[in-house]
Image (cartoon, rainbow, N blue to C red):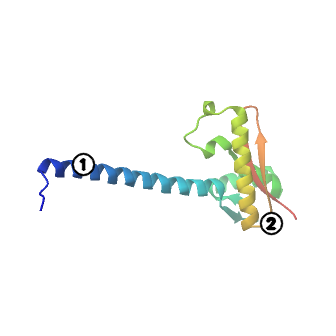
Amino acid sequence: MKVMSEEMQIQDFEVWTTYTKQSHQNMWEFLHNQERFKQLTTPQIVLIQDYIILQELYDEALLNDWIIDCHQHKQCVEQAVNICAVLDLFPTLEQNDLSKTDLKVLGEIIRKFWAKSFLERYGDRGIIVDLIEDEEHYFLSVYEVQI
């Protein structure tokens, strides 16, 4: 029977410790990214007072303000409440990280994911996802139309 030296055991332990820490971190990042991708491509909606609202954007006071400002016009309220900047969906990015063209392409990709997701889950509703261009930014807006 071969006995390992103390030095060899310590080196093996250090390699194993490093491996497991790195593996744990990699697994956590993978799961975190998978969950973030799911949230990014499959937004959840809630139905409040017959308005479809993106769950992450729901704010009761804001909704009530827009209901008054839009004179209860359903599409106007939903477009106003359900608007988000494409860049806000990627918290690690800043305005200078992407060209305007890149931002538009990214917005169009997300728009297609959202539209497909809503069609698969709520095919009986006419949920529209628009990509809106501003001078420097792109926004996604979600609303329902009669079908």
Q: Residue furthest bottom?
A: 124
The quadrant holding residue 147 is bottom right
Residue for badge 1: 14
Give neighbour class at mark 1: few <14, some 14-19, many 20+ (Cα, 10 Å): few
Q: Is residue 110 left or right of residue 14?
A: right
Residue for badge 2: 125
Q: Position of residue 114 (x, y in %)?
A: 71, 55
Q: Position of residue 43 (x, y in %)?
A: 65, 58
Determine the residue positioned at 74% across, 46% down.
Answer: 108
Determine the residue positioned at 68% across, 31% down.
Answer: 99
Q: Residue furthest right?
A: 147
Determine the residue positioned at 70% across, 64% down.
Answer: 48
Task: Tell me which amino acid carries mark 2.
Answer: Arg
The image shows residue 145, relative to residue 26, as above or below, that is below
Quadrant containing the N terminus is bottom left
Please, what secondary structure does the residue beneath circle 2 have? loop
Q: Residue furthest front?
A: 1
Determine the residue positioned at 71% across, 44% down.
Answer: 107
The image shows residue 134, relative to residue 64, as above or below, that is above
Task: Compare residues 57 and 20 and report the one nearer the observer.
Answer: 20
Task: Tell me which amino acid carries mark 1.
Answer: Glu
Earlier sequence position, callout 1 versus callout 2: 1
